[in-house]
Amino acid sequence: QQQQQQQQQQQAEDDIEDYALEPVITARYPKEDYPDQPLNIRLPHFCHPEGTDFIFPTREYKMPRIHHFVLTDSLGGKQYGTCLTVYEEFFPPGKEGEEYREKKKKDKSLPTFYAPRVLCLLSTYPYLSSFRTYLTQLYRLATSTNVMTAPIERYVQNICSEIPAPPPGAFEVKLNILGSTVRFWAPPADQPIPYVSLPFKVLFECLDIGNVLFAWYTLACERKVLLVSSQLSLLTVCAEILQSLLFPMRWSHLYIPVLPRSLSPMLDAPMPYLCGISRENFPYAVADISDETIVVDLDRNIITLGPNTPDLPPLPHKRRMKLESALKANAGEVFWEARNLCKEDVLNIRAAGDEVALSNLLGKAGAVWDEKMNTRDDAFNLAHAPDSMTLEFNDDARIDANDGKQSRWDAVQEAFLRFYVAMLQDYRKFLPVDASPDARTSWRGSDGVSEVRFRAEDFVLAQSPDFQPFLEELIGTQQFDDFVTKRMYNAGNAPDVTFFDQSIDAKKNRSKLKFKKVETPFLHSASAHKDLKSADAVEPTAEGLPPLPEGQTAYMYKMWPLEFDESLFGRPRPIPKIISAEFDRMNALKSMLRAQHGFADDTRGSGGRNKSPEVTAFVLFF
């Protein structure tokens, strides 16, 4: 009889492990979609990129993990997702689950089963590091402390409806949660580059200078690029950084930095793409990967070209040397420091021909990197999400704004900007004299209106011979088409185009006025940050809530609730007047520009389509 009971118990445990779990949304805020931001029906696939058909209860407890993803809508707008995946105790639904729960209370030796639950925050703003910190600290506050003075529902409502995304170049909004300060700020509108929101150091830790340059150049020439990493959080961060290096161009082709397993057939798409895939999913996607794809392994610093990858034109030698020199000066040691190495030591040992010493040195460095890299997705490894990482990666992005120097990451971003300034400094000479918005929608022209077009061939022939191979490639890309079209038909009022033109003028004026070459930096995130006004975000309030049970002083949760209690939400408080007034001022300015010069493009960064400061984030919890 005892043997029979043991067999029945074993069968019950096996039955639990055989449960196939289907991802469903159990709670969300707000309950209704924003009119211009409908919920993507494939969202569960991005929350579970390893595959929604392979989710089963497990006896192994896994530490909470973080990853990001990007969704693109039909108008080209982006939604950035930050997911915290936690493993919580699982019981089957119905009678079977109740019986196992009762048995487990009596017999502590029975195994515990766990199932993944995902807390997902969606926003039109790319505050990836900020949202990482917020989600992890909110989960800790709710499930591991006794200091939570308002229910989870009020915290969710607070981040969604009461904390504004700051107006560009005006305010820094600070939010405090469980001892961490989360900061939100955006660069001034006349410096429309997303560099301040990205932890550039991450990319330069993964890839050496040569491979960073090659990965950027493949995107500049619109090739098919696939990022691979064992750490999902690296994929979106590195993809966003590589995209930012294209400024003033914008990647406008297929973009899925975390590709769910179910979408791997898209890797054989006939158009350029920038995608990312986990190392776990990579074997399932190999058969779908186009033979023109360039695979960038972020874990191993290896780039592999497909057998039929189109040749890349040569980079102009002098411009390449300048770009490479600037990167080495500002980020040359980052790759080596991440592996506890000094590049000079490696070169000296290699020059001495001591293969054994070199092998030992690189072996130890590889172990150091593996240990560091393999914790990137760990949610509570806050070494990768310090306070300052809300819109700056770490302290080496901050300098004394009074000394006139740039931060190292300003200088890195500017090195790529200067490359495009040098290559395109004469492009305005080849624009049509008169291009009204009604004339055409593209600079390429067509029969009958050939005079209203960018004179691409003349532009290339007028440049230095070593510039021409790259420029011939560039003018055939969609990103250049989009750039010139915007320049022709927006009267120069798009902030990104205006800033680029001003950068060209600054370079030309410097060349004319200075007998001795003097560097004049274009980008100053440190001084821009210093000039910001500071605004503290309102904290969640318990006002209007029923009193806590006698003897209880805080809200405590054994696990994250499956559903929200609608009665615990309150009326969202208005955005602080000092910030809403700045939004009103900017909207009035845009209306004036639109009336005087045609449409004013405000899609330089994410979140630009939001109609009001209240609509700053779209949050769902699963």
Image (tube, rainbow, N blue to C red):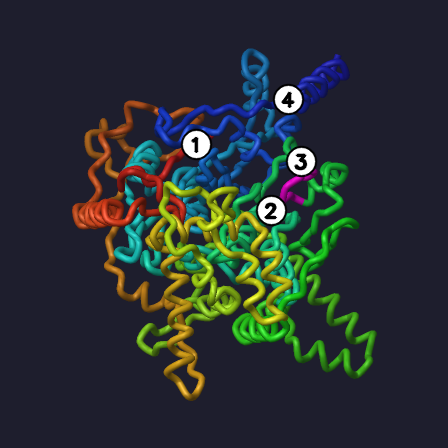
Give amino acid for label 3: Ser
Give amino acid for label 1: Phe
Cα distance, mark 1 to mark 2?
A: 28 Å
Per the image, label 4 sits on a secondary structure element best described as loop
| Foreground pick, 549 / 570 | 570
User: Which one is in front in this view, the residue at disc 2 or the one at disc 4?
Assistant: 2
Per the image, label 1 sits on a secondary structure element best described as strand
**Mark 4 surroundings: few (<14), some (14-19) or many (≥20) residues within 10 A:** few
Q: Which residue is mark 3?
A: 264
Task: Answer yes or no: is residue 128 visible.
Answer: yes
Mark 1 or mark 3: which comes first in sequence? 3
Chain part drawn in magenta = 264-278
Mark 1 or mark 2: which comes first in sequence? 2
Whether tag 1 and tag 3 are in contact, CB under 8 A, the answer is no
Mark 2 or mark 4: which comes first in sequence? 4
Lateral position of residue 98 relative to residue 402, left or right? right
User: Which one is in front in this view, the residue at disc 1 or the one at disc 2?
Assistant: 2
Give amino acid for label 4: Ala
Q: Which residue is mark 2?
A: 274
Cα distance, mark 1 to mark 3?
A: 26 Å
Whether tag 2 and tag 3 are in contact, CB under 8 A, the answer is no
Per the image, label 2 sits on a secondary structure element best described as strand
- The residue at 52%/55% (across/down) is 241
Looking at the rendered image, the quarter that the N terminus falls into is: top right
Q: Is residue 173 above or below residue 621?
A: below
- The residue at 46%/51% (across/down) is 451
**Mark 1 surroundings: few (<14), some (14-19) or many (≥20) residues within 10 A:** many
Q: Which residue is mark 1?
A: 621
Q: Which residue is mark 4?
A: 20
Cα distance, mark 2 to mark 3?
A: 13 Å
Determine the image quadrant of residue 276. Answer: top right
State yes or no: residue 262 in magenta.
Answer: no
